[in-house]
Image (cartoon, grey):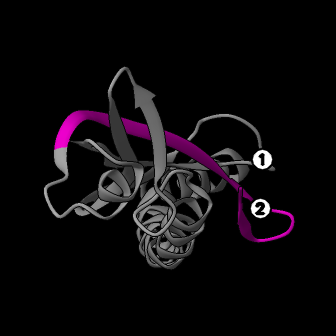
Amino acid sequence: MRWLFVGIFCCYFSVFPPLVLAQDDDLLHASLHAEFASFAVQWIEKVRTNTVPRPDKKEVIPNGTHFTGRYAAIDPASVDFSVKRSGATINSPWVATLQYLEGVYEHQAISMEEALNGAAFELVRLRRITEVFRYDAVRKRWVE
């Protein structure tokens, strides 16, 4: 009789807990997804303000008889991310990937001032940036 009870007990918890854990996992995933969305906005702003050269701090490069004004900028419409289980440690069970496009814009002119202030900056290079972040389960936050 005892073994029958143990068998029923094990069968019950081998069938139903995954459903409960899956629901809990889905709720946690949704929560971490929303938390990372906020983190990503702050991170993109930090990258944007720390990028040099940028639209408000262009660089000028002498190029023979001409000057080239240059800056880099993130395309806000290209920002995308995903959150998933890492399968790693208990302390870092989740990872997120953040992807965005960074464009380099240039304008060639005869004078340094015109190279800096010209209105005809053109996209000359585009690259996809992918960054990976981990979730610190102990501190309950995304780690930069």
Reply yes or no: does residue 131 show up in magenta: yes
**Which quadrant holds residue 43?**
bottom right
Q: Amino acid at mark 2?
A: Ala
Q: Amino acid at mark 1?
A: Ile
Pick the front one: 124 or 34: 124
Instruction: Classify 75 as above or below 107.
Output: below
Pick the front one: 67 or 141: 67
Pick the front one: 110 or 51: 110
Instruction: Classify 118 as above or below 30.
Output: above
Which tag, 2 or 1, sits closer to the chain's start? Answer: 1
Q: Are the two marked residues, 2 and 1, in contact with CB atoms closer than 8 angstroms?
A: yes
- Residue 103 visible in the snapshot: yes
| Residue where numbered disc 1 is placed | 90
Residue 34 image position (x, y, % from top left) = 44, 78
What secondary structure characterizes most of the magenta part? strand
Residue 79 image position (x, y, % from top left) = 30, 59
| Residue where numbered disc 2 is placed | 137
Q: Which residues are magenta?
A: 123-144
What residue is at 13 percent from the left and 56 percent from the top? 120
